[in-house]
Image: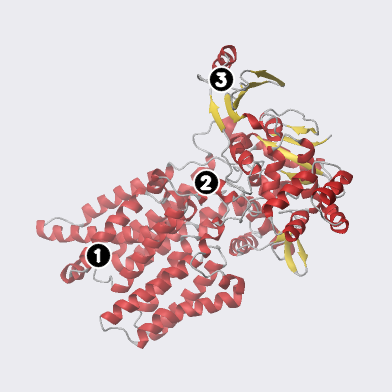
Amino acid sequence: MKIFLLMVLIFFTGFILRAETVHLVDINGTEGLYLTDDQGLPYMYELDSYYNYRITENYLKNGHPGDTLKAGIPWDSYSYYPPGRPAVYPPVISWVSIMLYRLLDPFTDMSLYELCFWLPAVVAPFAGTVMFFLIRKYAGDAAGFAGGILMVTAPLYFARTIPGFFDTDMFNCLMPALIVLFYTSVVESRDKYGCLASGLLFAVSMLLFSLSWTGWPFMLYVTLASAFIYSIISWRMGALDFLCIKRLFLPVLLAIFLIGLFNGPQQLSGINPIAILDSTSSTGPWPDIYESVSELGHPSVEVFLSAAGPLNLGFGVFGALVIISIFIRGDMRRKHLPSFNPFILTLSLVWMLSGLTAYYISVRFGILAITPLTFISSIFLGVVFSYMRVLSGRWNFRADIPVVLLLALIISVATIEAAEVRRVPFINDDFSDAAAFLKDGTREGTVVVTEWSYGHYITAAAERPVLFDGGSQNTPRAYWIFRAFETDNESLSTGILTMLTSSGDSAVSLLENRTGNTSLTVQILNDVLGVNRRSAEEILIRKYGLERGFAEKLLVYTHPERRNYVILTAEGMRYVGYWYLYYGSWNFTSFTPRPLYEVVDTGRSEMMKSVDEGSWRGKRPYRFIIKDGNSVKRVDVDESSNFSVIFLPDEGEVIIIDRRFDDSLFVRLVLLEENSKYFRKLYNNGNVIIWQLK
């Protein structure tokens, strides 16, 4: 009964703290309504959640993750259009959602969207209950309870598993904890059938993890590395036998077999030392768009210390040293860690060091460090509780009182840390209204050109295809989209977007295969995409010496029949303008200079004073560009200066920008929001504007 109550407390602590976040605390009522959908729920917090929802909806409607089938393969025709891409995604998140939806549907009127919204807050707390069972084997119920609470309140895990964060993160602490729980049971079990059952559960858990997240090989590496290291230690101690080898390696081999059998050879082909880092790989000579994704970069010192949880990180690192010092002293070990054996010590240290290394490489992988840090932190607390009991015997006071007080203090600090986590939805009513306009006010099949991070929401809410999104941004196509925004040659911009929305990457692939030279390919396409078909043919034949037959074949893709497309810009694009200018001006033969682009908050009075004085904070710009209401005024200042200043008094913002980009399409559409030579506003709600060709 006690164990059940502790499990319930852990689960509901995690669930209730997460459920409270739907109230958008610290956001005033008007803004809160602006960030809340028609169902009274906050919009989902990250746009990948909308992709996961769309995939889940496809499973429910079509029986597979695609919106259609192509040569028998589930196909996502909305993403990376044209031609779309295979709808390949870890399916467990969709399977769990649909299973629960069908289970609850006869009894509630909850929609699939609502279930997906709440699912992370339901699944994530189970990681705490699993951690409780794992820890109590070695350090008792009190330490297990502390570990469960630390697990469900770890700031990074908490922030990525609140209601509305419908992503695979909900499994990324739960599944590793299950894997370690069953793997330790295999090695430690003295019962033959218990060992076999644990081995099978371990393999199934590893299989499920491979179906839950593409970073699953991490736990395979951890278990294999631990097995090899422990084998060496056992061999040096003269304790290695065939039974030990079987227990260490057979479950891992079974897991690999099941993954290959049920999850396909492509999963096994990813088992290599750098598989988990594939998402951060570059694209050869093309720009590496992942450089712009903050969560794929190294964490700052502040983030490194706070995201995993100061308690977890502090107790984990310090606790590891304490545990090692106790473990190597037999009498101390028998007194304070009687159940802690060499195998779990080896596994926990390899697990923690691997997790911290992954965390240092990328913020995105910080979640991998949380589970081992929580485990070692809790074992350390178990040692502290044991010392308290020893001291109580010497000093004749009840041991449970200081243990309970310390436990209460730790739980209080952990829950306060979690309660202070704040997130603001990425989407708002303006985005929702714009998506509704796209769905109802544009022709079916109209392609949406927009910032890649908005892509998943557009495909889910507007049911319109996009050129790229959060699953297809790191491709050569990205350069051309950024190039269209970076250039001041709108004829070139129009040519690029017409090519991409009508024939996709066909022209780029065809020409690059012919030339074998990316730089030359880019040069040729930049020369021909801004001119008409006849002029382009002349350039291809006379300037570049291509035979007429090949030129005509290439022109089918570079100058195709135009497909309907629109450009969607939003206020948030102002803050990523640097990357548009940097990638759009990419130099394929040498170093690409970093463009000047900075957004500064200031007041109208300072802006007007700067215009009167002809300088911005002591420096004379090439030009002032003032957007006041619907009017735009340009004031030339200093021909020799290399930067311009764009004033947005209605927004209280100033953009300092490299003068080369004053007349770029990005400046005209995103910053100044003015009709250009080729594009005019089709829809405008203040925060989101949809543009069409004139």
Determine the secondary structure under disc 2.
Answer: helix
Asked whether disc 3 touches disc 1, contact meaning CB atoms under 8 Å apart, the reply is no
Q: CA distance from mark 3 to mark 1?
A: 62 Å
425 vs 484, left or right, is: left
Q: Where is residue 613, by image quadrant?
A: top right
Quarter of the image containing the N terminus?
bottom left
Instruction: Name the disc covering residue 620, or none.
Output: 3
41 vs 421, left or right, is: right
The structure residue drawn at horizontal position 35% and vertical position 83%, both measured from the top left corner, is 244
Q: Amino acid at mark 1?
A: Ile
Where is residue 388 shown, x and y percent of the image?
A: 19, 57
Name of the residue lying farthest toward the top: 612
Name of the residue lying farthest toward the right: 534
Q: Can residue 562 be spotted in the picture?
A: no
Where is residue 581 shown, x and y percent of the image?
A: 63, 38
Q: CA distance from mark 3 to mark 2?
A: 32 Å
10 Å crowding of disc 1: few (<14), some (14-19), many (20+): few
10 Å crowding of disc 3: few (<14), some (14-19), many (20+): many
Write down the residue under mark 1.
324
Q: Amino acid at mark 2?
A: Ser
Q: Closer to the camera, 519 or 266? A: 519
Q: Closer to the camera, 610 or 329? A: 610
10 Å crowding of disc 2: few (<14), some (14-19), many (20+): few
Instruction: Name the disc covering residue 294, or none.
Output: 2
Determine the secondary structure under disc 1.
Answer: helix
Quarter of the image containing the C terminus?
top right
The structure residue drawn at horizontal position 85% and vertical position 50%, both measured from the top left corner, is 560
Q: Does residue 200 sit above or below 483 in this rendering? A: below
Instruction: Mark 3 or mark 1: name the one nearer the start of the chain.
Output: 1
